[in-house]
Image: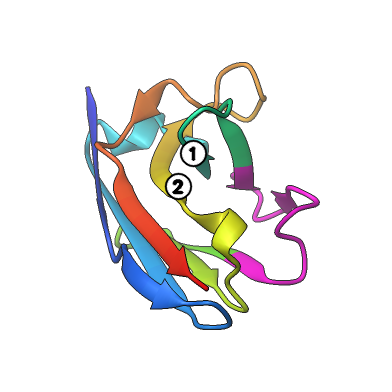
Amino acid sequence: QVQLVESGGGLVQAGGSLRLSCAASGRTLSIDAMAWSRQAPGKQRELVAVIFSDGSTSYADSVKGRFTISRDYARNTVYLQMNSLKPDDTAVYYCNAGGNTLATLSNYWGQGTQVTVSS
């Protein structure tokens, strides 16, 4: 079992910044990739950012250039730095962990943290 706990969500004005954190515990040696996804009311889940076991990253076009994913392997923690936030970024953000493929990187989920961006 892997447990994921997110923190750092909140309310910010458009143009502001937030940094989300996700700490993994349990069978952390089974984790290859970590990711952030989000889901807004009435919309499908969107994969936002992924960091693979080799350190390479991938971003959704909607956040590219504004968000940065990073990982502290020693502390089993992944971060999402969000800059230039827009109202469209409002969603529940989930931390994911799993394998190094799109099909398996979401084997584990955190509880989610709400991010609200006001205009």
Query: 82 above or below 54?
Result: below
Label disc, if present, on residue 95 of the rendered structure: none
Residue at x 38% of width, y 58% of height: 115
Asked whether 77 or 61 is in front, the reply is 61
User: Mark 2: which amino acid?
Assistant: Ala
Residue 72 falls in image quadrant: bottom left
The residue lying furthest to the front in this view is 119
Query: 97 above or below 5?
Result: above
Label 2: which secondary element: strand
Residue at x 59% of width, y 45% of height: 53
What's the magenta region? Answer: 48-68
Residue at x 54% of width, y 77% of height: 14
Say which residue label 2 marks: 91
Query: 93 above or below 30?
Result: below
- Give the color scheme: rainbow, by chain, secondary structure or one colour: rainbow
**88 left or right, relative to 111:** right
Query: Residue 80 in the image: x percent, y percent?
Result: 49, 63
Magenta-span inclusion, residue 27: no
Asked whether 83 or 89 is in front, the reply is 89
Query: Residue 108 in the image: x percent, y percent?
Result: 36, 26
